[in-house]
Image (spheres, rainbow, N blue to C red):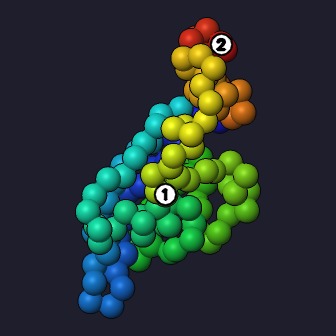
């Protein structure tokens, strides 16, 4: 499978008079780490809920791994993971050597498919 992991194009969501998301667009490539930052009320959670298929956009489009997440797409559920808030997981984990956290995560999820997989050997 090729193409971006996430494609969001001109996403809009309104709750009555409140415009929660107004024209958001972004692309996340496969293997890329991506975060959404902003003040309270900026529409971050609503945007992620639309990407996950929890909310229907008023307009715009979302593609997750090449498929529409809305209505809730059960084929996508085992393939997605979201960290919605800060986590202390890596701070509390024992680190027997530098980089062990990353190698552990890569072993569980598997390395991204790239031409040069040598960079991902653990």
Q: Which residue is drawn at 73% across and 52% down?
A: 78
**Left or right: residue 86 compared with residue 102:** left
Q: Is residue 27 in sight in this rendering?
A: yes
Q: Is residue 117 in sight in this rendering?
A: no
Residue 90 or 34: which is nearer the viewer?
A: 90
Instruction: Report, in whole angstroms, how far the alpha carbon at label 1 lies from the one at label 2.
Output: 29 Å
Q: Which of marks 1 and 2 is nearer the N terminus?
A: 1
User: Which residue is identified by label 1?
Assistant: 84
Helix, strand or loop under label 2: loop
Q: Which residue is drawn at 61% across and 36% down?
A: 93
User: Which residue is identified by label 2?
Assistant: 121
Residue 36 drawn above or below residue 118: below
Residue 82 or 93: which is nearer the viewer?
A: 93
Q: Where is residue 98 shown, x and y percent of the image?
A: 54, 17
Residue 28 drawn above or below residue 120: below
Tag 1 near tag 2, CB within 8 Å: no
**Left or right: residue 46 compared with residue 94:** left
Helix, strand or loop under label 1: loop
């Amino acid at each position: 499978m090729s193409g971006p992991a996430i494609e969001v194009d001109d996403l809009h969501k309104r709750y009555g008079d409140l415009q929660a998301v107004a024209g958001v667009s972004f692309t996340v490539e496969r293997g890329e780490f991506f975060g959404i930052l902003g003040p309270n009320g900026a529409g971050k959670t609503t945007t992620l809920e639309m990407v996950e298929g929890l909310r229907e956009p008023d307009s715009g489009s979302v593609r997750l791994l090449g498929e529409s997440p809305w209505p809730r797409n059960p084929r996508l559920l085992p393939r997605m993971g979201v960290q919605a808030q800060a986590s202390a997981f890596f701070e509390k984990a024992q680190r027997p050597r530098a980089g062990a956290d990353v190698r552990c995560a890569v072993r569980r999820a598997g390395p991204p498919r790239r031409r040069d997989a040598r960079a991902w050997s653990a």
